[in-house]
Amino acid sequence: MKLHVSPDIFPPRGHEAKRMSIVDAAASVFCREGFAGANIDLIAVEAGVSRQTVYNHHGDKERLFIAVVRDLTERCNAGIFATFASFPDQPKDLEADLIGFAIRMNRNCICNRDGKFLRKLIQTEGERYPELFAEWRDQGPGRTWPALAARFARLAHAGFLVIEDPDVAARQFLALVNAELQTTFMLGGTPQDDEVVQSATNGVRTFLRAFGKRQSAARADKHSALAGA
């Protein structure tokens, strides 16, 4: 007996809406099952489309995974660059303004759904399938790190910080402001807001101890005294 499925069960969707549904479903499945454990049938069921539709849109599982990473990277970049627009180029209170910026980075870019999915895929699959993340390296850190470095370079040029290598400073800033969230991430949780604030605050204060004017000036005076001894 042939089963008749009413078209009302799966109402027609546009090409882009269907593609996004597949990508979102695939992101969930890849994060939950891993690349090796995921399969097209499971993704199709979760997306509410046929198996053939997944193949028509994305081809095989490897190309679908790459599409997921690309889409997550684009969405994360959009959030990151929107947050970069609030970077304190002319701070009134450097510590407070950088803490505020770091909190926004953590909330908007690190702890949101897209950030969590992308981080999980990189952590679980990056070592086994590095070739699947080649585009992410170029379009993710390859774009966002230099953009943040340029902002720190401007702060240094304006006399707010003492930085020899803005690229290093940018990477260390990002590492420091979410360092205390990593245990929660590794256990699959979402940090509470007070954890986000505390991690950003501690990270910025550590960053300023390394790159702040007073500390850097003190180091320079010490070096000068030693040189003259």
Image: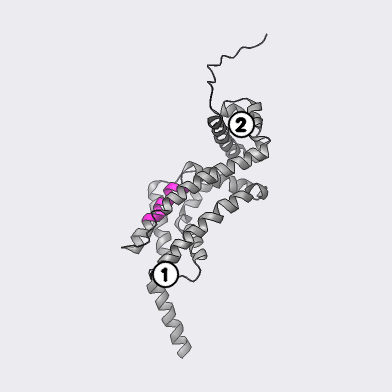
Position above or below: 161 against 34: below
Residue where numbered disc 2 is placed: 43
Q: Amino acid at mark 2?
A: Ile
Q: CA distance from mark 2 to mark 1?
A: 50 Å
Q: Where on the picture, by quarter, is residue 54?
A: top right
Residue reaching furthest to the top? 1
Of the residues tagged 2 and 1, which is closer to the observer?
A: 1
**Magenta-span inclusion, residue 88:** no
**Magenta-span inclusion, residue 106:** yes
Residue where numbered disc 1 is placed: 157
Q: Nearer the viewer, residue 128 or 15?
A: 15
Is residue 68 visible in the rendered image? The answer is: yes
Q: Where on the picture, by quarter, is residue 154?
A: bottom left
Is residue 229 visible in the rendered image? The answer is: no
Image coords of residue 225 (percent x, y): 43, 86
- Could you tell me which residue is drawn at 65 percent across and 28 percent down? 41
- The chief SS type of the magenta part is helix
- Could you tell me which residue is drawn at 47 percent across and 51 percent down? 181
Q: Secondary structure at mark 1?
A: helix
Q: Secondary structure at mark 2?
A: helix
Position above or below: 41 against 153: above
Q: Nearer the viewer, residue 184 or 209?
A: 209
- Could you tell me which residue is drawn at 66 percent across and 39 percent down? 63
Q: Which residues are magenta?
A: 100-109
**The N terminus lies in quadrant:** top right
Residue reaching furthest to the front? 15
Image coords of residue 111 (percent x, y): 46, 46
Answer left or right for 36 relative to 111: right
Q: Amino acid at mark 1?
A: His
Q: Where on the picture, by quarter, is residue 204?
A: bottom left
